[in-house]
Structure formats: structure tokens, C-alpha cells
Image (cartoon, helix red, strand yellow):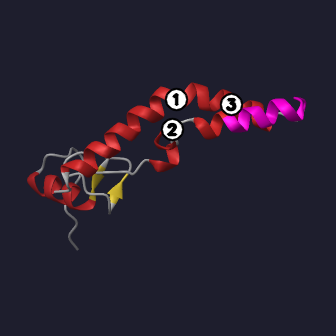
Amino acid sequence: MAKKSSIEKNNHRAQLVKQYAVRRKKLKALAKDKTASTEDRFAARLKLAKLPRNSAPSRLRNRCEISGRPRGFIGKMKMSRIAVRDLGARGLIPGLVKSSW
């Protein structure tokens, strides 16, 4: 089990990413727009830099929804490999069978 503070920190970041997504998208589009004036593009970059750092999507960490484990994350199931193996062994994941040969 991961530290609760790490899990909560990541949840807070996810909330900030969602909150600032539209604003960040507009500012990035304006900053990349070649038809806009240089001053407008520079101002957009400055406004983008003033946004909270934790509102950037690259600061999010994929974590297991069961244990909060950051490593061995399987994106399709949103769980770590250990949680998938445990639930699969109990037969709680439909369609997942233990391999044998």
C-alpha cells in the first residue's frame, strides 16, 4: 500500500489538471499560432507559466486504484500487476484465466 499522502497528492494534481485543462489548451494554441503577433504569443507563454505547475498533465502519476502502487501499472485495468494477479486468482476479473501449459 502506498503512502496516503502520495495518493492524495496525485488526486489533487488530477483535480487541478481537470480544472485548468481548457485554459491551458487555449493558451498553448495561442502560443503556437504563427499568425498571431509576437507580443500576443509571448504574453500567452507568460500566462501559461503563471498557471500552477501541478495543473500540467505530465505531472500526473499512474497509480493502482486498489493499492496506490505507482509501478507495474496496467493502463487498461487501471491496476498494478500485483492487484491484477490477486483479483485474477480469485476469479474476480471476467475473462482472465490463469495460464497453464
Do the CB atoms of the residues marked 2 and 1 lie less than 8 Å apart? yes
Which residue is outermost to the left? 90
The region drawn magenta spans: 35-46
Give the CA separation, mark 3 to mark 1: 11 Å
Q: Amino acid at mark 2?
A: Pro
Identify the residue position indicated by label 3 in the image: 27
Q: Point out the tag, 3 or 1, that comes first from the N-terminus.
A: 1
Establish if 10 lies above or below 86: above
**Residue depicted at 51% across the width and 49% down the height:** 58
Query: Which one is earlier in the sequence, the residue at label 2 or at label 3?
Result: 3
Q: Which residue is mark 2?
A: 52
- Determine the residue positioned at 69% across, 37% down: 46
Disc marking residue 48 = none
Q: Amino acid at mark 1?
A: Tyr
Res. 56 in view? yes
The residue to which callout 1 is attached is 20
Magenta span dominant secondary structure? helix
Which of labels 2 and 3 is toward the front? 2
Percent of width and height locating residue 19: 46, 27
Q: Residue at x 82, y 29 (%)?
A: 40
Identity of the residue drawn at 64% across and 36% down = 48
Disc 3 marks which amino acid? Leu
Query: Considering the numbered disc 1 on the image, is that residue within a helix, a strand or a loop?
Result: helix
- Residue 43 in magenta stretch: yes
Q: At numbered mark 2, what does the secondary structure look like: helix, strand or loop?
A: loop
Q: Observer-nearest residue: 51 or 69?
A: 51
Residue 39: give x, y in percent of width and height. 85, 32
